Amino acid sequence: MHKSLLSRKYLSVVLFMLCCIELSYAQAQKTKPRFRVIAFYTAKRDTAHISFVHEANRWFPKIAAEYHFIYDSTNDWSHLNTNFLSHYQVVIFLDTRPDDPAQREAFQRYMENGGGWMGFHFAGFALTPSDYPQNWDWYHNEFLGAGQYVSNTWRPTAAILRVEDSTHPVTKHLPAIFKSSPNEWYKWEKDLRNNPDIKILLSIDSTSFPLGTGPKPYEIWHSGYYPVVWTNKKYRMLYLNMGHNDIDYENKTNKELSFQFGNAIQDKLIIDGILWLGQAKHHSQN
């Protein structure tokens, strides 16, 4: 009897310890970051872009805490190197692109080795001649596929967006059409529909027209096809044309009149986008 009681006590202690270990492991797995994100930005040109950068750097940390990933940001583009990038699964360009050849090479190598990337608005901009010429063929013609910027709507206006692929992880939880936050929308040199590597996820729905308020006639779109969110199937990437807040330039107050975040459906798009990029196993889903 005495031995039997000891055995039962011993077994109870062992089972209790195993339960504790299991719970500790489960808790560790729950709190362990799912992936790491690094956002690069400049925030020196155009008040509307600067506003967006600051807004993004307030919003993303909250989302990171909620969805258990790490969000870091830096305006030091010298960190765009192989060693630094090796610590992150996703890179974000918030408002521009790198100009240094070594940084460009490091970014291309990162993407070709399966890294993830999310780019907003001006990160896709290139125009020759301008301060941001098209002098990076791999990035603008192959990676983004859009070529140069051609024109834009004005002023920043909400658009009705249409989901082009409701099966993709980034868009499968979105309604077929929805209203975006106000934005300045870009027209591109190349027709992405003709590029077999590009999967267009969202475009401007025709019910948006006329889009823009001018005052210049060419700043108001009345027809046409305009992709605004897409991915390149050769890479783990997502480009979003959103990223230009409305600013009170006319009265010279520089007051922010609109924001990109806070629109529940558009927020869901970005959240699902970052989760897809961070958790994808290389090029498994495009």
Image (spheres, rainbow, N blue to C red):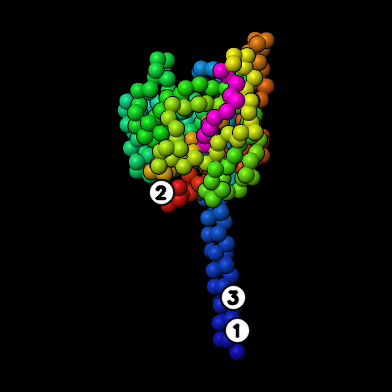
Q: Position of residue 67 (x, y in %)?
A: 58, 46
The residue singled out by tag 3 in the image is 12
Residue extending farthest to the bottom is: 1
Q: Position of residue 211 (x, y in %)?
A: 62, 25
On screen, residue 31 versus residue 123, left or right, reads: right
| Residue drawn at 33 percent across, 37 percent down | 109
The residue singled out by tag 2 in the image is 283
Q: Which residues are magenta?
A: 218-229
Quadrant of the snapshot with the N terminus: bottom right
Disc 2 versus disc 3: nearer the observer: 2
Amino acid type, mark 2: His
Q: How many neighbours does mark 2 have within 10 angstroms: few (below 14), some (14-19), or many (20 or more)?
A: some
Disc 1 versus disc 2: nearer the observer: 2
The residue singled out by tag 1 in the image is 5
Amino acid type, mark 1: Leu
Distance of label 1 from label 2 (alpha carbons): 57 Å
Q: Position of residue 57 (x, y in %)?
A: 56, 31
- Residue 92 seen in the current view: no
Relative to residue 88, is residue 101 depicted above or below? above
Q: Is residue 228 magenta?
A: yes
Amino acid type, mark 3: Ser
